[in-house]
Image: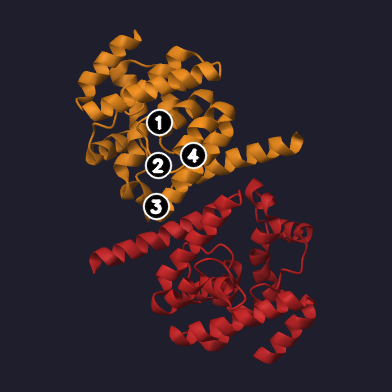
Chain colours: A orange, B red
Amino acid sequence: MKLEEIQDKLKEFLNDTDCYEHCVRVKDMCNSLAKQYGLDVYKAEIAGLLHDCARKHSADELIYMAEDLNIPITEVILTEPHNILHSFIGALVAEQTFNITDQEVLSAIKHHTMGASEMGLLGKIVFIADKIEPARNYEDVDKLRKLVYEDLDSAILMTYDIVIKELLETKKIICDQIINARNKILFHIQTKTKIL
Amino acid sequence: MKLEEIQDKLKEFLNDTDCYEHCVRVKDMCNSLAKQYGLDVYKAEIAGLLHDCARKHSADELIYMAEDLNIPITEVILTEPHNILHSFIGALVAEQTFNITDQEVLSAIKHHTMGASEMGLLGKIVFIADKIEPARNYEDVDKLRKLVYEDLDSAILMTYDIVIKELLETKKIICDQIINARNKILFHIQTKTKIL
């Protein structure tokens, strides 16, 4: 399926201009980062475009779909069901509605909100593209936009730290997943620095 | 065993004036908080006094003792073995060297560094007394010293948030345990507020 066809189908499927335009900006960001890091541009664009394809579903619908997938609905998920589940269910929607079978693309969609301990290059690019696309506006976003072209892992770590601080300040629950992912990349960076 | 006898024994056992004096200050803080919250003052003082009794052991000794207790030595622990393990091993030392058998006291010692999801009143008091004893000096410590007499749970949550922010800023690994404990008390506070 051509990128343009997927993009047209997504526009109709989402039926939400703001969300659709955000997806297009993330796709463009993924294009740029894929070129920087030598990744298949088409795959990066598809993953960027479809990362929020499940955003149109309500929290209740997402919980229902998650139960169907045997995802345990924990207390943590119930505090922010839409935010946490739309990425997991996004992988399912991308597969069933947009016929995506590439496991790397599906995994990148699945982990774009909170990251994961074991993210490949595509996962990292989609995760950070979502946080720095041109419409994002928060303290340090410009630092991050610069850093991402110099050192992807350090930019990912900085993103995790920004997200966790925001969760602390807004008194929201923090998922284990983002902490484990942040610990893993911190450990990786520190070990690499020691070796060098 | 009388408190004075335990205190004298601890002084000799630690053989470290700074650590000993910190323990005495935490004991005094526990005394004050126990009175505020209607807790057995003797138990609070014992737990406060002995909370750091395993600090004298080196990281290697603590790891050796932890392995003996079947505590899994994870990558996370290996990044900060002394900080993380001295509280767990402290419960063992308190039992074996100071003949403490009270499970609440042992549990409060065990969890005084990172807190825990299921902390009783004694655990909470020792945890926070350690963070606000008079020699502690950091931004917001005076706010915390005031809050702890008004709302213990909110003070505990604020302490977790301060510790986690410090771990982010100093690029240190964050244990799951402190995140889970922070989520639990946040959830508890928010649920209580909704009911009220």
Residues at badges 1 and 3 in contact (C-beta under 8 Å)? no
Q: CA distance from mark 4 to mark 2?
A: 11 Å
Residue B70 percent coordinates (x, y): 67, 56
Occupied quadrant, residue A89: top left
The residue to which callout 4 is attached is A159
- Of circles 1 and 3, the one toward us is 1
Residue B13 percent coordinates (x, y): 78, 78
Q: Which chain does tag 4 point to?
A: A
Occupied quadrant, residue A53: top left
Which residue lies at the image location 25% right of the left edge and 14% below the top edge?
A8
Q: Which chain does tag 1 point to?
A: A
Q: Amino acid at mark 2?
A: Tyr
In the displayed structure, would residue A126 be above or below residue B34? Answer: above
Query: Which of the pair A130/B43 is nearer the observer?
Result: A130
Judge if badges 3 and 4 mark residues of a common chain.
yes
Residue B4 percent coordinates (x, y): 69, 91
